[in-house]
Image (cartoon, coloured by chain):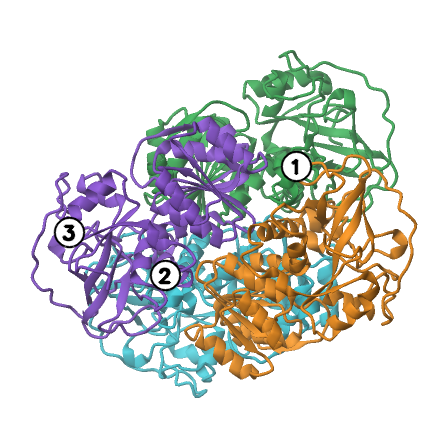
Chain colours: A orange, B cyan, C purple, D green
Amino acid sequence: MVLLGDGSPPEPREFADPVLEDGSVLLETLASEVCGTDVHLQHGRLSGVPYPIIPGHVSVGRVRETGGVVRDVEGAQILPGEVVTFLDVHRTCGRCWYCLVARASTRCPERRVYGITYSATEGLLGGWSERIVLLPGVQIIKLPASLPPEVFMAGGCGLPTALHAVQRGEITFGDTVVVQGAGPVGLCAVVLAQLQGASQVIVIGGPPARLAMARALGADLTFDIAEHSPEERLRLVRDATGGRGADVTIEAAGVPAAVGEGLHFTRDAGTLVVVGQYTDNGSVTINPHLEINRPHLRVLGCWGSDFSHLYRSVRVLARHAERFPWRAMITGRYSLQDAGAALAAAERQESIKSLILPNGSLG
Amino acid sequence: MVLLGDGSPPEPREFADPVLEDGSVLLETLASEVCGTDVHLQHGRLSGVPYPIIPGHVSVGRVRETGGVVRDVEGAQILPGEVVTFLDVHRTCGRCWYCLVARASTRCPERRVYGITYSATEGLLGGWSERIVLLPGVQIIKLPASLPPEVFMAGGCGLPTALHAVQRGEITFGDTVVVQGAGPVGLCAVVLAQLQGASQVIVIGGPPARLAMARALGADLTFDIAEHSPEERLRLVRDATGGRGADVTIEAAGVPAAVGEGLHFTRDAGTLVVVGQYTDNGSVTINPHLEINRPHLRVLGCWGSDFSHLYRSVRVLARHAERFPWRAMITGRYSLQDAGAALAAAERQESIKSLILPNGSLG
Amino acid sequence: MVLLGDGSPPEPREFADPVLEDGSVLLETLASEVCGTDVHLQHGRLSGVPYPIIPGHVSVGRVRETGGVVRDVEGAQILPGEVVTFLDVHRTCGRCWYCLVARASTRCPERRVYGITYSATEGLLGGWSERIVLLPGVQIIKLPASLPPEVFMAGGCGLPTALHAVQRGEITFGDTVVVQGAGPVGLCAVVLAQLQGASQVIVIGGPPARLAMARALGADLTFDIAEHSPEERLRLVRDATGGRGADVTIEAAGVPAAVGEGLHFTRDAGTLVVVGQYTDNGSVTINPHLEINRPHLRVLGCWGSDFSHLYRSVRVLARHAERFPWRAMITGRYSLQDAGAALAAAERQESIKSLILPNGSLG
Amino acid sequence: MVLLGDGSPPEPREFADPVLEDGSVLLETLASEVCGTDVHLQHGRLSGVPYPIIPGHVSVGRVRETGGVVRDVEGAQILPGEVVTFLDVHRTCGRCWYCLVARASTRCPERRVYGITYSATEGLLGGWSERIVLLPGVQIIKLPASLPPEVFMAGGCGLPTALHAVQRGEITFGDTVVVQGAGPVGLCAVVLAQLQGASQVIVIGGPPARLAMARALGADLTFDIAEHSPEERLRLVRDATGGRGADVTIEAAGVPAAVGEGLHFTRDAGTLVVVGQYTDNGSVTINPHLEINRPHLRVLGCWGSDFSHLYRSVRVLARHAERFPWRAMITGRYSLQDAGAALAAAERQESIKSLILPNGSLG
């Protein structure tokens, strides 16, 4: 299925069988996901996208064939029949100033992303497809036996994003963490905050079904933004934190106003991680004396994720596959042909996360 | 001299000879400073100030008498005749949540500050006075032989403030640092950035005399805000940094717009330290997607300073007393009676730093 | 009960009812603990102990009386009838070079410790006593309703020690952690490593009962040092970590050889925290090229704990009181009169942790 | 010139003109260096060296020809006639667990090093040669106009090594730094410690000429190990640091005993960086209670350097080319034919740093 970026629904397209160059891998797609980015892509809201594209940046597949010997990061050979995932970010150059001097590979200008910045004319480089071609150099991870593909997909692209944000927030034992937003990134942050030692996790978001999911994942308190005014939310957070505010706030809401509100949720000398502002939704007005300087705050933008975040996500999921109700985050399963319906549900925010199953089932 | 907070000039006042309680120290004031805070105090712009107050928070004095044995942080006894300074911040409690759990002592609600939050009715607790009483527990530092009192006063309250900010910015070898603002904090940051290994220091500020001072202190480039529009300044910074922006930006300008501009001066995955927003001067509008999240920025509020910053400032000055033209930052010397003129000059921003010499000279 | 430091068993001693000075608190002791330190104290193996002493540094008590208004770190008043604990470390000065400049309060030379460095001649300053006097300035924590006193005592002094060590180790998501030693500190580290995101925890220690406890607390693998030679242990750790070794190793074993072994357990560019070498048990030979420099290792000594570690321990326990089988770590409960038997059991390493219940029960 | 690894002097060898593949660069060698590693290489003391090799890992050359368009890290094209240097470490894979998950590229098992782990049979991959071939992917830096090639070579391979070590030590304003060893790494550390804000730098080493060089570079105190016993050295360091020891110690001495001594030189809660143990010179006995655990020490092995360290070294040198007497570190200049004499002088430790000038002069 391809997107054209003009708001039209995804269209089916046929591709010739790919010829595998040395170092590449052909996957039979088990599952790919539908996320908010795909809705943006449908409507052409991201710049520089080489339409038509095959969407689906985080996927799981079964290896059908490899071009020569291909190895994973541990040096183990990738073998036909194995179930693997891979980092959607490709061609991080490892040679530019950002990669080498700043060590900020998520700002590398060379990086290309499966399902987003590769064109369908370049090949099967997205997950909404029966087959995926992993180009030479794509970083591949074998799913451990203890990690069912479905659980991996429940984490999806939200988990490495949240993992990067939570790592950056440097949560420690006993901290109170406020998570703004109850979408996939926010819900994953609820789990990860606990796994870094937080003693109290508060979610500010909606709708009620997502807040119920947050509680099932371990959130101690959830406040529905539809029920509480900004003033009330601030009071509720203060009441739950001895009047001080959260040690760490993870903004995963996406609206600019959340950043302003997050500054208030955070205690003096605390940390606000801004990870939800993935697209340009406008501005927010802040008072730098009252909201940054005097409270000695730390505000950390967090962009993208790299291989370490995906690798660590897989390790976390493998360890905690049964402890948390990951599967409950998957609220829809669609065939390739029904991808349009999946997108529409995502746009209406009816679902938490939908999967595309191009070959019928997750096996 | 006391300030009443109603905009009137400082007034002389007579005090009885203080009785020293055990653990306290009586100083003959050698010098105190006039800084922007004192102008705010004169006009009553800070809340919670117990007027009348004796201004002057950073001072140098000669010990006249001690109440029993008093020791410095190294355990050395404070002796009559020695020249000392002291941390203006007093009574950081060491017992509250901010002191003990957050380890953010500059947010301790118990802290009192000489020359700002002590009333003249409580005693000689400010530097614009012939004598200063150091209450029990005030942290005292003997000036090393290699550090002339005048050089110490040139650093004044700006140096520990800047030291805290520069430390927080985590500058490393070869970095480009932009300093916004050429007042005492900004000028000290110019020196300190070099002492952390910065290879290029750019100052954005004014007026020309202060920018000349910045260059004398080692700034590589200075841009006058009166001569260049915000767009030009951004282009000039980009031109000087391979198009990327500064690794670390130190905002020491004080106007809210500087924070918005500082976000643009800073390269992706770089750091902006907000230290200049000491009072509430209003708001600034920012775009959290374009200016924080996507560039993976780190924005660090920096409030106040603690004993370590003053201690390290003294060490830095003692080592580099002759390498940098510190004394040139002192642009005015006033007797106690002329404190009003000193304040007026500070308000007109004619001076960089003025000293009050209550006993006639710095010895 | 007091210890004389000559190897003799603890002796009963009667004390007059204490007179409470302002700011102090009188507790009815609910429980105190017996730890390895107490065995050292019995035999006079620590220097500078002012015998006779009342042992018992971590304790829980019920408030009987306060000298005036006493508050906790949150500003809440301590009231009669409340169940509290307190930091055994007292009089950290907050004024010395280590407290103020190095910010290393556990190296403050002024600190005194309940149950260790206070003499019985100074009052009821240890937990093996029906009453405990909390001197002015002792930092008190009210046990939350969700934290049964028994669960708190199960963590005991090992938990804040382990928390400090684990924090220092900077474990992150997906890490493999090796814990050397299965005593109270090691067992607490097993829990805390998981709470920081470790995906695999391996314990090297013994005897079998303690290793079973480690597994009950979540350890993935345990290796008995009585069954495996050092070479085998290293191979087992390597086998479990893709040949690389642990990301973080926590040495909580106490014998010098464990440090040498820990260097080998740790992967290149990994971290070894040395927290178990509480007393001088001799030396170990290391090869700095092969074991530190070439592997780019980080070796971190970790001494003592401060209020933040106790505070965070209480928060962790309150959140996870039921998730982990804390109570199973308590292997003995003794009356004051039977303290000698408790000490003897600790010396024979038969127990994991024994409690002294001076007033009969934990209520 | 090639080394055979059997202790014999370097031998001249003729090579055919290289054919440049796309992405490679041919340099006319302006200078290469002679360092302690070359003496080890001559005698076959490093394992896995593919003799015969062309020594010389850090070099400066003038571009003669490029294979197609080749760019530096800033994206600027490398042009014939330009003077450049390059990172001797090549083929850091960017794909292995150490590169991607641990982010410890200096432990990447794929890395190859010019002048050390490349054989002469593979081409002109060392600096003791009239021409050097930079293979595709070698990271190249243009020397800035303000950095004379001779000054760059004075820093040589010691500067990025020392820069990595000093960065890892996290020196801050006012710190006292002890540097153990007065070879090229130690001498560079003397400069770099000052550039990170150290207020006092103490060098423990020898012989007298190198200590004089250390003082010329800014060391405050130097102690000759030939004149002072280990006990005296410890006392001298304590005397210079208020009895506490150094905040940060940089071990650049190379003998195992220096690590044991460095533990004592360092204050409680301070840092010892172990960077000098480049080869296996045996063992040292330490007491982990007294020397690591109780003093709460941080001991950091530091291996190799990556591109960021070389890039930052060039920036530091360009800024401070005239402030420090770099050129005085060059104590010998040799033609290619006299490389044997250069090696012999290095082995006798008569020189600090010798240059090989294969084309007669530095231009």
C27 left or right, relative to D100? left
Q: Residues within 10 Å of mark 1 (few under 14, many from 20)?
A: many
A137 left or right, relative to C63? right
Image location of residue B113, percent across then percent down? 37, 72
Q: CA distance from mark 3 to mark 2?
A: 28 Å
Residue drawn at 53 percent across, 83 percent down: A231
Which residue has dot 2 on it? C314
Q: Is residue B220 visible?
A: no
Image location of residue A306, percent across then percent down? 67, 52
Any mark on residue D151, and which?
A: 1
User: Mark 2: which amino acid?
Assistant: Val
Q: Residues within 10 Å of mark 3 (few under 14, many from 20)?
A: many
Residue drawn at 55 percent across, 28 percent down: D278
Q: Is residue D335 visible?
A: yes
Residue D40 versus residue B46: which sits nearer the camera? D40
Q: Is residue C221 depicted above or below A119 in this figure?
A: above
